Image (cartoon, rainbow, N blue to C red):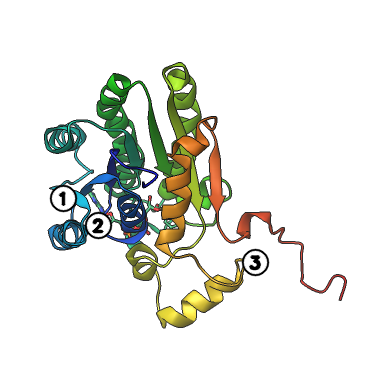
Amino acid sequence: MGTHDNKVAIVTGGAQGIGRGVVDVLSSEGAKVCIADISDEHGQEAAETINKNGGSAIFVKANFEKSDVPEKVVNECVSAFGGVDILINNVGIQPPASYKNVEETPEDIWDAILNVNLKSYYLMSKYAIPHMRKNGKGAIIHIASVQGLQSMRGVPAYAASKGGVLSLTRNMSLDYAKEQIRVMAICPGAFNTPLLRNSMAGDIEEGFKTMGEAHPIGRIGQPEEIGHAASFLCSDKASFITGEYLVVDGGMMAWGNWDTGDQGE
Ligand SMILES: NC(=O)c1ccc[n+]([C@@H]2O[C@H](COP(=O)([O-])OP(=O)(O)OC[C@H]3O[C@@H](n4cnc5c(N)ncnc54)[C@H](O)[C@@H]3O)[C@@H](O)[C@H]2O)c1
């Protein structure tokens, strides 16, 4: 028996990176998975690999910058699998051209980031919740970021989107708690994904090593480590958890920047 046997999960941006880590873990624990992603190549490959290995997955081509897409994704999932139990709102973008202060941020980049990282979470929830209601319960996980909790310079749109995701999580948890539809967020630290790789200049492995040192645990994270956290939160073992965020960051948010490392030595 798998934890998610007979459950249907939609993972947005599930073809690569953190989303793929979540897809692989949920599928290995019995869920039927709908991978909604803009990448044909990686989405097809992910679904084929899962189906070949005895799991059950479909790929739905989706561009979450567009507001008519979420309803279609939910409908395709319901046609294929008969419902929706779990929604993982994971898709997120942080294009290198967005690393600017507010004065320099072009409006189209602001809109693209907010549409993908925040508005798609609202719209996917809007269309998935009626199907969860039919099942008498459901779980929604929003992938936020440690950047929803603290900030850095030059990321106004991304920071606003992640703060918005955490606030949306709290609100939705209250609106749907009575219906046993739980809404939670995960705040990743730095993870080894195409998004992080594309945001780096110079030697990537060297950059990962330096970034890893900012995490007390001494390394950056791997996508399946978010997968396992998400799997627990959307399982019945977490049935009294809602409205909460889980930081999965190797201890980074616990680390005060006044700690020079010399104390007590
Ligand atoms: N990687 C990190 O270090 C990190 C840290 C904190 C939070 N996050 C968050 O985790 C989530 C996943 O990030 P990631 O690093 O895996 O990203 P990624 O870019 O590596 O993967 C994102 C996936 O989303 C797809 N995608 C991109 N734009 C899309 C669109 N418009 N419509 C549909 N699909 C689209 C891509 O094809 C890809 O499969 C994001 O919300 C991101 O903000 C990542």
- The answer to whether the residue bearing label 2 lies less than 8 angstroms from the nearest atom of ligand 1 is yes
Which label's residue is closer to the chain start, 1 or 2?
2
Q: Which residue is mark 3?
A: 216
How far apart marks 1 and 2 lie (CA) works out to 9 Å
Callout 1–callout 2 Cβ contact below 8 Å = yes
How far apart marks 1 and 3 lie (CA) works out to 37 Å
Which label's residue is closer to the chain start, 2 or 3?
2
| Image quarter for ligand 1 | bottom left
- Residue at 39% of width from left, 35% of height from top? 140
Residue 255 appears in the picture as rendered: yes
Mark 2: amino acid: Ala
Residue 88 quadrant: top left
Give percent across and percent down for residue 94.
Answer: 36, 56
Alpha-carbon neighbours of circle 2 within 10 Å: few (<14), some, or many (≥20)?
many
Q: Is residue 150 above or below residue 123?
A: below
Mark 3: amino acid: Pro
* Residue 15's disc number: 2
Left or right of 243? Residue 71 is left
Q: Is residue 107 above or below residue 225?
A: above
- Residue at 41% of width from left, 79% of height from top? 204
Outermost residue toward the front in this view: 1
Give percent across and percent down for residue 10.
Answer: 27, 41
Q: Which one is in front, 51 or 199?
A: 51
Mark 1: amino acid: Phe
* Residue 98's disc number: none
Q: Which one is in front, 125 or 98?
A: 125
Q: Secondary structure at mark 3?
A: loop
The C terminus is located in which quarter? Answer: bottom right
Which label's residue is closer to the chain start, 1 or 3?
1
